[in-house]
């Protein structure tokens, strides 16, 4: 494991690169922020979105996919301040926390906006949770698919060409692009990054799932997207993105942080909605790649100047490896699996660049350069992991 010398990211993070000084691409791109004229960029953004303002008042000015979190509140507030009429859109995961539900209601009521919430069949989602976990190592595959499919279906259906997302995650976190690239959402990004090369067709026939169960997963055709002129823009390309500042505006609107500390990170205002985001979904990232949500949060806050790397390292060592309880119990009950079955399947997704086996336990190197063991080896079949013979 090679770690960035400035933040807490390991080189195995998706789409991350490092220079000869072991400074990661995320930190290098983050440095660009200090040299950008953000006022000029915001003017470009405002002029751009105002050009999409509905002339007839017979449709919405844009669609904003929202989870109900702090960034969602900021995005909706920003467009409301401009006098625009966005349609809020939410893909409901069936994993919402109580506070997340309250925030989801608050975002539309505090700003007086229309809000479409799509509820997929819970029976279908129960099956997709199980299939997604076994096939991709992520029970939330259906969530990624819904968030990056349904808003585009509605854009085509209601002839609303503009979709607005927050920051570009792969730019902001790992520096996949420069801020000067102004990346927009693409079908290729959906397929390769968001859905990790899988499609809804991979789920058909598993756990009794049928094609008719997954109609909501379909992405519009190129012809329909071109006809409407659909574009997916990221606000973070034009506006200085700082979740800590967005939190202040969100709280003024009535946004609530998680009432209890999280098991796997120190931030109580991020990923409040879905119990798996800071729970087993993130724990599986640790199992696969040896880092988790606390690494994401500390890296962001180090780059923004809210903490030192030394402080970040201590937090990562405290939180990243913790196995969450409530989230795991909820998932096991929903899928009918046991914890032992969960662990055996999870083991098969461990990255050999990170993990090795010694004395029946999984080991990895850490930010403080001290190797530690994290759990007993519980593989389904050794032949499923060809790298085992090399250790």
Image (cartoon, rainbow, N blue to C red):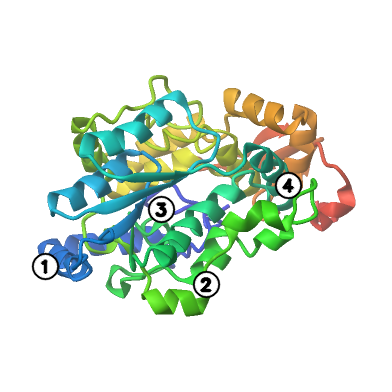
Determine which quarter of the picture holds residue 99. Answer: top left
**Quick check: 46 above or below 79?**
below
Please state if 10 lies on the left or on the right of 299 as rendered: right
- What mark, if any, has residue 188 been given in the picture? 2
Q: Which residue is mark 1?
A: 40
Q: Earlier in the sequence, mark 3 or mark 4?
A: 3
Q: Earlier in the sequence, mark 2 or mark 4?
A: 4
Q: CA distance from mark 3 to mark 1?
A: 32 Å
Q: CA distance from mark 3 to mark 2?
A: 32 Å
Percent coordinates x, y for residue 90 in the rendering: 43, 46
Q: Secondary structure at mark 2?
A: helix
**Front label number (3 vs 4):** 4
- Do the CB atoms of the residues marked 3 and 2 lie less than 8 Å apart? no
Q: Earlier in the sequence, mark 3 or mark 1?
A: 3
Q: Residue, x 65% and y 62% (percent of image)?
A: 199
Please state if 84 lies on the left or on the right of 208 as rendered: left
Q: Earlier in the sequence, mark 3 or mark 2?
A: 3
**Front label number (3 vs 1):** 1
Q: Which residue is mark 3?
A: 5
Number of other residues with Cα within 10 Å of mark 3, as a class: few under 14, some 14 to 19, many 20 or more:
some
Q: Which residue is mark 4?
A: 131
Camera-side residue: 52 or 382?
Answer: 52
- In this rendering, does residue 305 appear at all? no
**Front label number (3 vs 2):** 2
Q: CA distance from mark 4 to mark 1?
A: 47 Å
Percent coordinates x, y for residue 109 in the rendering: 26, 34
């Amino acid at each position: 494991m090679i770690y960035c010398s400035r933040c807490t990211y390991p080189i195995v993070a998706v789409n991350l690169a490092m220079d000869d000084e072991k400074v990661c691409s995320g930190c290098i791109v983050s440095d660009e922020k200090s040299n950008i004229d953000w006022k000029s960029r915001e003017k470009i953004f405002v002029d751009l979105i105002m050009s999409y303002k509905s002339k007839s008042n017979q449709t919405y000015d844009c669609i904003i996919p929202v989870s109900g979190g702090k960034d969602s509140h900021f995005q909706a507030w920003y467009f409301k301040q401009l006098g625009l009429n966005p349609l809020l859109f939410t893909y409901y995961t069936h994993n919402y926390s109580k506070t997340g539900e309250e925030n989801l209601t608050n975002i539309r009521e505090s700003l007086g906006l229309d809000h479409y919430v799509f509820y997929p069949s819970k029976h279908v989602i129960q099956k997709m949770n199980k299939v997604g976990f076994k096939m991709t190592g992520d029970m939330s595959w259906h969530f990624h698919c819904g968030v990056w499919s349904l808003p585009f279906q509605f854009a085509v259906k209601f002839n609303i060409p503009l979709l607005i997302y927050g920051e570009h995650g792969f730019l902001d976190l790992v520096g996949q692009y420069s801020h000067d690239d102004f990346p927009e959402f693409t079908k290729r990004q959906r397929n390769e990054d968001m859905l990790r090369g899988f499609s809804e067709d991979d789920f058909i026939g598993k756990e009794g799932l049928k094609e008719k169960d997954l109609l909501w997963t379909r992405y519009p055709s190129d012809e329909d997207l071109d006809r409407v002129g659909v574009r997916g823009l990221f606000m973070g390309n034009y506006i200085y993105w700082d979740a800590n500042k967005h939190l202040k505006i969100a709280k003024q609107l009535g946004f609530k942080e998680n009432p209890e500390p999280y098991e796997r990170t120190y931030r109580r205002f991020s990923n409040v909605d879905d119990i798996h985001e800071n729970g087993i979904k993130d724990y599986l990232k640790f199992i696969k790649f040896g880092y988790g949500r606390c690494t994401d949060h500390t890296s962001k806050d180090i780059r923004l100047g809210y903490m030192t790397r030394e402080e970040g390292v201590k937090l990562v060592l405290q939180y990243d490896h913790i196995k969450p309880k409530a989230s795991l119990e909820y998932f096991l009950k929903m899928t009918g699996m046991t914890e032992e079955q969960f662990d055996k399947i999870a083991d098969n997704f461990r990255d050999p660049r990170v993990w090795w086996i010694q004395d029946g336990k999984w080991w990895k190197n850490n930010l403080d350069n001290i190797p530690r063991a994290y759990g007993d080896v519980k593989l389904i079949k050794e032949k499923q992991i060809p790298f085992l013979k090399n250790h």
